[in-house]
Image (cartoon, rainbow, N blue to C red):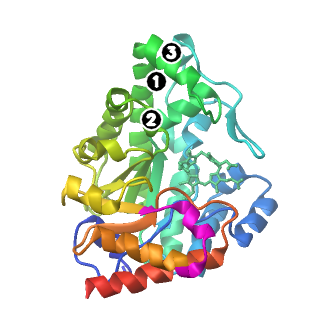
């Protein structure tokens, strides 16, 4: 492989500079993405057509000197394959025609057939690996069981989480039944991505941070740990690093590190140096520039990126990222400034 900085940092091996990839590095802030999405007719059509998913995955790598590609897909492919009727309401985000709100509805759910119903994802992974031809590693991903459940129970984005929290507190057994089904499905889904060529995987626990500490351990972390333990090695026998990203997970870093994951994804509400002192070198750390900094001027982006790298400090085990995804109105030139600044400043620290 020509550029393996990302995998080296995840393994705590020395690197020539800090590797960087960005959550949502492909998407609406890129005019070439908007054009292709219009041609494709819908976002799900992009995800479900391997050639289009491959093209969108590669778009940001043509513009920026990124150290990783991330499979273009969505975490909601799993509930979509379970028959919940996924659709996107413009300006509102994802919705389901058939949310699952009762123990009876949960009892009727069945695991999707990963090869049949989600085969397009593994096909996309194989195609992207071929097209990347070793230029950077390919990251696969899935949603955490808890985060998938929030969308499945609420039926869409929520500010209060009242339906899923009522279910969690009133019907903990049904909640666990749903999370158990999702954990088994996500494990099989990530293993299919690994078998097809994903070289690292990230679990997105976007909504873990809305739980109490006790509920986080019981209803989110426990299931992510089961997934970590159920992941297979790559076809060549090598270990595939797993990154756990809980937005709002700062209070629970020690617990997250204890799952056996290789890296923790940090949001922007914790200093990366503080995080490192808390977990030591047990895991690598990924993050954690405030995504809204991309709306600041390039020289400010550069200074703040350097500050994150300096706060992490010397030694290996840092993968640069934002604390959450790139948002649609960001100027691509600002992303270019960030990527270059990270490589320049990271090299100064490495040498
Ligand atoms: O990071 C990447 O470049 C890979 C692609 C990716 C997408 N979704 C593409 C996408 C990844 C990793 C995701 C994960 C995802 N999807 C998460 C977890 C990460 C996070 O952001 O917290 C979540 C919660 C979802 C569910 C989802 N899908 C949401 C909330 C939305 C946005 C709706 C909106 O209109 O803002 C989507 C749609 C989606 N997924 C888009 C993209 C590029 C936008 C689709 C479009 O309108 O073109």
- Where residue 317 sits, quadrant-wise, is bottom left
Q: Secondary structure at mark 2?
A: helix
Residue at the spot of label 3: 107
Rounded to the nearest angstrom, the CA distance separating label 1 from label 3 is: 8 Å
- Say whether residue 56 is left or right of residue 75: right
Q: Earlier in the sequence, mark 1 or mark 3?
A: 3
| Residue 216: percent from left, percent from top | 37, 32
Label number found at residue 114: none
Query: Which residue is labeled 2 in the image?
Result: 145
Q: Which residue occupies 64% across, 75% down?
A: 332
Whether residue 174 is visible: no
Disc 1 + disc 2, Cβ < 8 Å: yes
- Position of the C terminus, as image quadrant, is bottom left
Which residue position is annotated with label 1?
178
Label 2 and label 3: CA atoms lie apart by: 16 Å
Q: Is residue 295 magenta?
A: yes
Crowd rating for badge 3 (residues with CA inside 10 Å; few <14, some 14–19, many 20+): few
Rendered location of residue 168, percent (x, y): 45, 19
Q: Which residues are drawn in magenta?
A: 288-299
Residue 325: x and y in percent read: 55, 58
């Amino acid at each position: 492989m020509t550029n393996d900085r990302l995998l080296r940092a995840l393994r705590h091996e020395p690197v020539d500079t800090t590797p960087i990839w960005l959550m949502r590095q492909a998407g609406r802030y890129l005019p070439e993405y908007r054009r292709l999405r219009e041609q494709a007719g819908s976002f799900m059509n992009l995800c479900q057509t391997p050639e289009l998913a491959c093209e969108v995955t590669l778009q940001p790598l043509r513009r920026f000197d990124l150290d990783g590609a991330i499979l273009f897909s969505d975490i909601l492919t799993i509930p979509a394959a379970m028959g919940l009727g996924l659709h996107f309401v413009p300006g509102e985000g994802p919705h389901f025609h058939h949310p699952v709100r009762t123990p009876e509805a949960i009892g009727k759910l069945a695991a999707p057939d990963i090869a049949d119903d989600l085969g397009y994802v593994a096909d996309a992974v194989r195609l992207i690996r071929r097209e990347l031809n070793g230029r950077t590693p390919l990251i696969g991903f899935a949603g955490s069981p808890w985060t998938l459940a929030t969308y499945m129970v609420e039926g869409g984005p929520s500010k209060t989480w009242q339906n899923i929290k009522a279910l969690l507190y009133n019907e903990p057994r049904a909640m666990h039944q749903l999370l158990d089904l999702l954990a088994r499905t996500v494990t099989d889904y990530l293993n299919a991505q690994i078998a097809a060529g994903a070289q690292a995987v990230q679990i997105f626990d976007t909504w873990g941070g809305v739980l109490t500490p006790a509920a986080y351990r019981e209803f989110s972390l426990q299931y992510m740990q089961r997934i970590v333990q159920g992941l297979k090695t790559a076809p060549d026998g090598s270990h595939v690093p797993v990154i756990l990203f809980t937005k709002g997970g700062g209070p629970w870093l020690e617990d997250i590190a204890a799952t056996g994951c290789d890296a923790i994804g940090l949001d922007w509400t914790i200093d990366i140096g503080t995080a490192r002192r808390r977990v030591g070198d047990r895991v690598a750390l990924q993050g954690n520039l405030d995504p809204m900094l991309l709306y600041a001027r390039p020289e400010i982006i550069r200074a703040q990126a350097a500050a994150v790298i300096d706060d992490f400090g010397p030694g290996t085990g840092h993968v640069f990222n934002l604390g959450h995804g790139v948002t649609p109105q960001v100027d691509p030139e600002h992303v270019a400034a960030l990527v270059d600044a990270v490589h320049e400043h990271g090299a100064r620290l490495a040498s």
